[in-house]
Amino acid sequence: MSLDDYGHFDVVVVGSGAAGAPAAIAAARSGARTLLIEKLPFLGGNSTAVLDTFYGFYTPGDRARKVVGGIADEVVAGLRSAGSVVERPNTYGAGTGITYLGEHLKVVWESLVEGAGAAVLLHAFVQDVVVSDARVTSLVVATKAGLRRVGAGVVIDASGDADVCLHAGFGYEAAGTVDPAQTLTTTFRMANVDHQARATIGKEELHALMVEAAESGAYDLPRREGSDHITPIPGVIATVMTRVEHAEDPTRNAADPDTLTRAEIEGRRQAIEYARFLVDRVPGYEQASLVALSTQIGVRETRRVYGDYRLTKEDVLGASQFDDQIGLCGAPIEDHHGRGATGTNWEYLPEGTAVGIPLRTLIVRDATNVLAVGRCFSATHDAQASVRSMAQCMAMGHAAGIAAAQAVNIGGMVRDVPVGDIQHRLRTDGAILELTTT
């Protein structure tokens, strides 16, 4: 089959979520001719299609310490310019969250990406990857006009599912093959909620009502420790309540199209059931109505690439520091394993500390010119359950974009870019690479 050429780009970023969009911004600002490819009709991935809160900007605990800056700060500033933003504590003590309107964030991402000079291609899926001597030379992309070939000097896989690495034949660990894959969640929003009445009960009382409702047999609530939170819109509350398993076969996670199809349908079914429970049983929801479901189901984990280094649980809980770190994470391990009605394990770093994110975890082990960022970066199941927070994804993307642009002039050899040069540029951009002692 002959393919039409879409052009050749210095840097091609696949996936425009909290990791991919900053990667495109950083690469384009560094002078690289950059293309950002996205399967949805808008930018942002989970940050606009599923969720409404950035976590990971701050460490948890009594004294919050900011651990992410740079392009991530520009995103928050753009949201504040667009409208109201709410900073609020996490229900489970994971640190201060920054809650925004997803519709505003779509435009903020577009403004920053296009303002940096990057090209954008929406409604596009990577279908194949051409590899020569461990080097990706081009991608085959499905568009509304058919298949197109995109040439690339450096590729950043920010697809979340490591789609580029899959098609290229590079190594990865599939979620579920070693540890149970983290469950999926369809989020939803309720309008006309009486905030004052809702505030009369706390987390424990809400969970008790969930248990009581489920045990009555009148409601099908697989998860009985979900959460709801205020949004910038008065009377509107957002939820993280549903819980969907990947598949009975542990080798088939949500990267499998049939599994994902079933999960999408089941997630919406559960959302309707949880909304009914809230209206019937929870103070403040008596006059509330369901107004929105997430555009797609929230996926926490499918594939994790093998990089030059693999971040581990011991690294995270020990707040390990690295000579080549390009970001920090203080978020706890948040493992939605799905076993039982609660089914979420929380493990916290020592208060006020953060683990470093090594550049080596972004460099794909089996390739010369490919970086992987976001939830598919090189980490074990437990470590990924901490560092997948959206603020950390933004930090990874920022670093990868700089590294990719600097690699363009040396044949795309990402390992040959001096890490000190990347770190210097990150600091100049306002990124945070280590915690101060004060």
Image (spheres, rainbow, N blue to C red):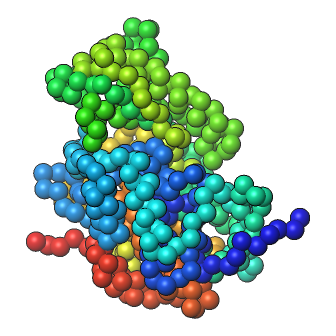
Q: Is residue 329 left or right of residue 107?
A: left
Tell me the residue at 30%/25% (across/down): 192
Task: Count numbered badges in the picture.
Answer: 0
Q: Is residue 68 left or right of residue 5?
A: left
The picture places residue 58, in percent across and down from the top left corner, at: 24, 58
Q: Is residue 68 left or right of residue 47?
A: left
Q: Nearer the viewer, residue 129 or 49?
A: 49
The picture places residue 164, in percent across and down from the top left corner, at: 65, 64
Q: Is residue 88 left or right of residue 190?
A: left
The picture places residue 257, in percent across and down from the top left corner, at: 68, 42
Tell me the residue at 71%/58% (across/down): 143
Tell me the residue at 22%/49% (across/down): 87
Q: Picture quarter containing residue 437?
A: bottom left
Examine the rendered structure and indicate whether residue 15 appears above or below residue 302. Answer: below
Q: Nearer the viewer, residue 234 or 354?
A: 234
Q: Nearer the viewer, residue 405 or 381?
A: 405
In this rendering, does residue 261 appear at all?
yes
Check the picture and name the quadrant holding the C terminus.
bottom left
Examine the rendered structure and indicate whether residue 294 appears above or below residue 196. Answer: below
Q: Picture quarter containing residue 331?
A: bottom left
Examine the rendered structure and indicate whether residue 394 appears above or below residue 426. Answer: above
Tell me the residue at 52%/49% (across/down): 301
Q: Residue furthest bottom?
A: 410
Q: Picture quarter containing residue 388?
A: bottom left
Q: Residue furthest left?
A: 438
In this rendering, does residue 377 appear at all?
no
Q: Nearer the viewer, residue 40 or 130?
A: 40
The picture places residue 38, in percent across and down from the top left corner, at: 58, 58
Examine the rendered structure and indicate whether residue 309 appears above or below residue 183. Answer: below
Check the picture and name the quadrant holding the N terminus.
bottom right
